Image (spheres, helix red, strand yellow):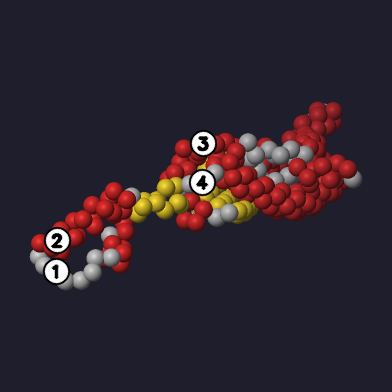
């Protein structure tokens, strides 16, 4: 039972979403299935110098997947407005000179200057990178929590499927015990019919029958399947199981395909189809694991 708990705790999905927000800084991170590691970051230009640190933080927590990161900082948190008095003075003096030169009526006041605010109002970017990093880390924690919860569900389903495959393989081995002698008897009868008028050494016939029977024997495949199933269970106890499990699923499928091709027994063929169905379901789930 404890082994089961460890397996569930270690598995992690590649899909998830995490977010965090504080004092006008908001970070959102989405992750999707990806064979390799891919990070896309959208953030204000003044944070570009810290992008490597954000990327390293993700690489330190995850092994693969596609990550879309959005960092937004509101004007209230990021901007401090200042007046460039020198520029404002030059604008005011220019307007007053223009008014005097052309005898233009009206009062030159702050409302007149407001029209030119973009010329003398300056925005200083003010932010605390440590605070931004803390919000980023909280978003990563949130993402990891969701990926772990998704991973638990995937692991539970994979354990159910591998249990089903193991049960089918036991049924297959029991069927072989009955099917192989019957296949040998049928083969012997066919040879007798074909060689009804021919003289043949009984010992030689038994030898040839044994050789032919070995070519359709799938005992080796069922044994290897058991080994792969055990290895599959062990790999679920790893937080980087996805790629290895994907390869192992291919090996499981190869063994079952060999069983199907070597045997002409209806019962064995039926079981092989059921096994391939379970393996295909496993493949779909494994591709979501980190």
Instruction: Classify mark 4: residues with Cα within 10 Å, few (<14), some (14-19) or many (20+).
Output: some
Dot 4 lies on which element?
loop
Q: Which residue is mark 3?
A: 52
Q: Residue at 31% x, 59% y: name it.
A: 117
Q: Which residue is identified by label 4?
A: 127
Give the residue at mark 2: 98
Which of marks 3 and 2 precedes in the sequence? Answer: 3
Residue at the image position 30 percent from the left and 67 percent from the top: 111
Mark 1 crowd level (few <14, some 14–19, many ≥20, 10 Å Cα): few
Q: Residues within 10 Å of mark 3 (few under 14, many from 20)?
A: few
Name the N-terminal-most of marks 1 and 3: 3
From the viewer's perspective, tell me whether residue 245 is left or right of residue 98. Answer: right
In percent of width and height, residue 207 lies at 81, 29
Q: Is residue 72 left or right of residue 250?
A: left
Task: Tell me which label, 1 or 2, sits earlier in the chain.
Answer: 2
Q: Residue at x 24, y 65 (%)?
A: 108
Q: CA distance from mark 1 to mark 3?
A: 57 Å
Residues at badges 4 and 1 in contact (C-beta under 8 Å)?
no
Q: State which mark lies toward you, 4 or 2.
A: 2
Asked whether the beta carbons under mark 1 and mark 2 sit within 8 Å of each other, the answer is yes
Q: In x, y percent, where is residue 192? A: 80, 40
Relative to 53, is 145 above or below? Answer: below
In this figure, which residue is indicated by the disc labeled 1? 104
């Amino acid at each position: 039972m404890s082994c089961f708990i460890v397996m569930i705790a270690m598995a992690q999905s590649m899909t998830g979403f995490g977010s965090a927000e504080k004092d006008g800084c908001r970070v959102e991170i989405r992750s999707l299935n990806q064979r390799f590691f891919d990070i896309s970051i959208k953030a204000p230009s003044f944070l570009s110098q810290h992008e490597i640190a954000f990327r390293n933080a993700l690489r330190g927590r995850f092994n693969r997947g596609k990550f879309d990161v959005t960092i937004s900082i509101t004007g209230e948190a990021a901007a401090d407005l200042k007046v460039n008095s020198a520029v404002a003075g030059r604008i005011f003096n220019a307007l007053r000179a223009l008014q005097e030169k052309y005898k233009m009526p009206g009062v030159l006041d702050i409302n007149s200057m407001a029209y030119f605010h973009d010329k003398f109002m300056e925005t200083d970017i003010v932010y605390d990178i440590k605070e931004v990093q803390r919000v980023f880390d909280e978003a990563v924690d949130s993402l990891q929590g969701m990926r772990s919860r998704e991973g638990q569900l995937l692991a539970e389903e994979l354990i159910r499927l591998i249990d089903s495959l193991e049960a089918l393989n036991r049924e297959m081995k029991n069927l072989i015990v009955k099917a192989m002698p019957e296949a040998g008897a049928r083969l012997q009868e066919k040879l007798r019919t074909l060689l009804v008028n021919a003289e043949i050494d009984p010992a030689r016939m038994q030898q040839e029958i044994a050789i032919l029977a070995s070519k359709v024997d799938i005992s080796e495949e069922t044994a290897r399947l058991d080994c792969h199933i055990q290895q599959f269970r062990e790999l679920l106890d790893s937080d980087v199981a996805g790629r290895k499990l994907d390869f192992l699923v291919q090996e499981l499928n190869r063994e079952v395909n060999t069983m199907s091709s070597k045997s002409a027994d209806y019962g064995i063929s039926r079981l092989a189809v059921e096994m391939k169905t379970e393996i295909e379901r496993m493949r779909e789930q494994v591709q979501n694991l980190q």
